Image (tube, rainbow, N blue to C red):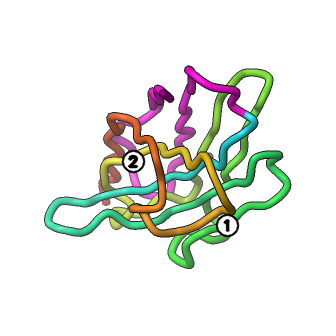
Amino acid sequence: QVRLVESGGGLVQAGASLRLSCAASGRTFSTYNMGWFRQAPGKEREFVAAISRSGGNTYYADSVKGRFTISRDNAKNTVYLQMNSLKPEDTAVYYCTARLWGTVVTAPHEYDYWGQGTQVTVSS
């Protein structure tokens, strides 16, 4: 069993930055790929970013590429999402996810564990 707890969300103005954190527990953190998804009201959950076990490979949705950075600290069992130049369309609940087997993927149903989510609201 893997437990994921997100933090760092909040209300900011357009153009600001936020850093989300996700603390993991329950298994050896370095053995699973990690991802971030988000879900806005009335919309489907969408892929934001993912990172491989070692942190050597990262993947981003086109909508956040160049603005968001995913990273991980395996010594601290934590994955981060640095979000810069935030836009109102980034407003959503952001979820941290873990995938135990295989490679990094972008489909939400391929992930095994989910956090409870943290709200990010960007005002114009």
Q: Residue at x 51, y 49 (%)?
A: 16
Looking at the image, can residue 7 be seen?
Answer: no
Judge whether 15 appears above or below 34 on screen.
Answer: below
Looking at the image, can residue 109 be seen?
Answer: yes
The local crowd at label 1, few if under 14, some if 14 to 19, many if 20 or more residues have their Cα within 10 Å, is: some
Q: What segment carries the magenta color?
A: 1-29
Q: Report x, y in % for residue 84.
A: 59, 54
In the rendered structure, does residue 3 fall within the stretch colored magenta?
Answer: yes
Q: Mark 1 or mark 2, which has the lower sequence index?
A: 1
Q: Report x, y in % for residue 83.
A: 57, 51
* Front residue of 2 and 11: 2
Q: Report helix, strand or loop for mark 1.
A: strand
Type of amino acid under label 1: Tyr
Q: Quadrant of residue 30?
A: top right
Judge whether 61 appears above or below 28 on screen.
Answer: below
Q: Report helix, strand or loop for mark 2.
A: strand
Q: Residue at x 72, y 39 (%)?
A: 31
Q: Report x, y in % for residue 89.
A: 34, 67
Type of amino acid under label 2: Tyr
Provide the residue designation for mark 1: 59
Q: Report x, y in % for residue 40.
A: 25, 60
In the rendered structure, does residue 6 fall within the stretch colored magenta?
Answer: yes
* Front residue of 34 and 82: 34
- Farthest left residue in view: 42
Judge whether 5 appears above or below 62 on screen.
Answer: above
Provide the residue designation for mark 2: 94
Q: Residue at x 72, y 21 (%)?
A: 76
Quadrant location, the C terminus: bottom left
Q: Which mark is residue 115?
A: none
